[in-house]
């Protein structure tokens, strides 16, 4: 597959690495790696470790967490089925800059670094896909940071939940009336870490979104009842 075809297919499949590969490429990557199951809260890779493997998530959800020198941990992102993780350190030949930890049971394909780079050399079009993954993640992080600078509690949370709803919907997680159960089982503390806010701020913001009929909540479960409405609020189209 050409680099352009891989890139176009990635965009059509929501940017997910695995879904952008063709059958031949998937078979070759499976041949290079091995399947592994990680229990909830188990690390897929550790911040500071030497780079020795990459992982493709096949099912389940994981969070990307970075810790400061004083031990303060910050949630940076969430990854799900089809996503490539633990890859930037391998390709950059440096220590890992973050820990990737399972949020629920994760089934994954683990590929040693040398075999992954050999796979990329044998399938040069996939290099464009990996590069595109880097660029999209940088763009997403920049967009979210810019929005967070100007947004306050409920809207800041709505930005995260709207993005998570989009991710979950791409996995087929839709319910009655177009409602979308958010796949990653994130706690209020984890949401607060991701949006740089306290748990109390998250709880108040959730109450506002619930009262507006945009979401329904349970223990580590959030359902977006009105995805278009939540996205419009996140984008600043109206206030609550």
Image (tube, grey):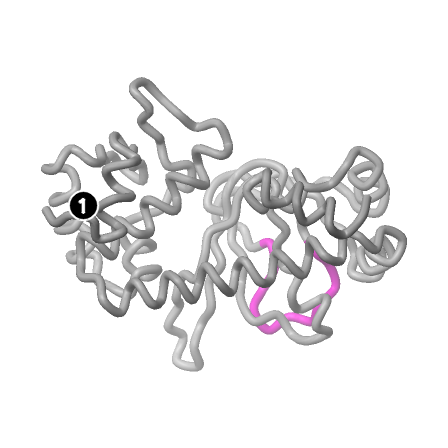
Q: What span is colored magenta in the figure?
A: 44-54
Q: Which residue is mark 1?
A: 206
Q: Residues within 10 Å of mark 1 (few under 14, many from 20)?
A: many
What kind of element bears circle 1?
helix
Q: Is residue 25 above or below residue 213?
A: below
Give the number of marks.
1
Name the side, left or right, on which 183 lies relative to 162. right
Nearer the observer, 8 or 95: 8
Q: Residue at x 25, y 32 (%)?
A: 226
Q: Quadrant of residue 72?
A: bottom left
Q: Residue at x 69, y 53 (%)?
A: 129
Q: Residue at x 28, y 64 (%)?
A: 148
Q: Residue furthest top?
A: 176
Give percent across and percent down for residue 210.
15, 37
Name the side, left or right, on which 226 lies relative to 120. left
Nearer the observer, 53 or 91: 91
Pick the quarter of the image with the N terminus.
Answer: top right
Q: Residue at x 80, y 56 (%)?
A: 116
Is 45 part of what is drawn in magenta? Answer: yes
Main secondary structure of the magenta stretch: loop
Give percent across and percent down for residue 235.
27, 51
């Amino acid at each position: 597959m050409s680099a352009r075809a891989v890139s176009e297919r990635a965009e059509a499949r929501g940017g997910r690495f695995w879904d952008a590969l063709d059958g031949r490429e998937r078979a070759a990557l499976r041949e290079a790696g091995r399947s592994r199951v990680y229990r909830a809260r188990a690390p897929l890779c550790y911040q500071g470790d030497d780079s020795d493997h990459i992982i493709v998530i096949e099912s389940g959800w994981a969070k990307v967490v970075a810790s400061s020198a004083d031990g303060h941990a910050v949630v940076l992102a969430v990854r799900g089925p089809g996503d490539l993780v633990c890859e930037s350190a391998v390709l950059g030949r440096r220590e890992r800059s973050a820990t990737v930890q399972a949020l629920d049971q994760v089934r994954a394909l683990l590929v040693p670094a040398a075999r992954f780079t050999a796979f990329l050399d044998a399938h040069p079009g996939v290099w464009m896909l990996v590069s595109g993954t880097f660029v999209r993640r940088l763009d997403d992080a920049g967009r979210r940071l810019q929005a967070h600078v100007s947004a306050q509690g409920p809207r800041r949370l709505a930005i995260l939940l709207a993005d998570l709803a989009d991710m979950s919907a791409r996995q087929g997680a839709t319910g009655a009336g177009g409602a979308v159960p958010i796949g990653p089982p994130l706690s209020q503390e984890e949401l607060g870490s991701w949006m740089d806010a306290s748990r109390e701020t998250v709880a108040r913001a959730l109450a506002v979104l619930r009262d507006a009929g945009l979401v329904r909540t349970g223990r580590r479960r959030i359902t977006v009842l009105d995805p278009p409405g939540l996205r419009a609020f996140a984008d600043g189209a109206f206030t609550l």
